């Protein structure tokens, strides 16, 4: 897959995962050069994810960038993101 070739953090490095909650699974992949947050919503409904639950792993991250849409979200202002039903989103962490 082209994404894995362009973003080494998706296939290499440290893996930190969290127990699924309400059918939403969140995990992080981290290399020396790049960090990614992957959110999988297995639910039949749209889900709002509270990023405060992951603040230790997010660390000094100021913004996240959606790999598919290139949309950048300032998470210092908005600590919640919405994930569509039965979908997954990949975010690069920007410090």
Image (spheres, rainbow, N blue to C red):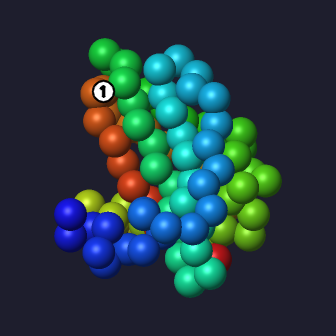
Q: Say which quadrant the C terminus sits in.
A: bottom right
Left or right of 82, for residue 35: right
Say which residue appears at 39% left-offset and 30% top-offset: 41
Q: Position of residue 76 (x, y in %)?
A: 66, 61
Quadrant position of residue 20: top right
Say which residue appears at 37% left-offset and 61% top-offset: 66
Q: Say which quadrant the N terminus sits in.
A: bottom left
Q: Nearer the viewer, residue 76 or 70?
A: 70
Q: Nearer the viewer, residue 22 or 64?
A: 22
Number of numbered discs visible in the structure rendering = 1
Q: Which residue is mark 1?
A: 85
Q: Nearer the viewer, residue 74 or 93?
A: 93
Q: Residues within 10 Å of mark 1 (few under 14, many from 20)?
A: some
Quadrant position of residue 46: top left
Say which residue appears at 64% left-offset and 50% top-offset: 16
Residue 75 shows in this picture? no
């Amino acid at each position: 897959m082209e994404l894995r070739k362009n973003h080494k953090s998706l296939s290499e490095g440290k893996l930190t995962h969290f127990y699924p909650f309400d059918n939403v699974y969140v995990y992080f992949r981290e290399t020396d050069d790049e960090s990614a947050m992957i959110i999988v919503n297995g639910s039949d409904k749209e889900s709002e994810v509270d990023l405060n639950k992951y603040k230790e792993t997010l660390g000094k991250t100021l913004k996240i960038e959606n790999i598919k849409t290139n949309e950048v979200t300032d998470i210092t202002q908005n600590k919640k993101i919405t994930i569509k039903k039965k979908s997954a989103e990949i975010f690069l962490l920007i410090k």
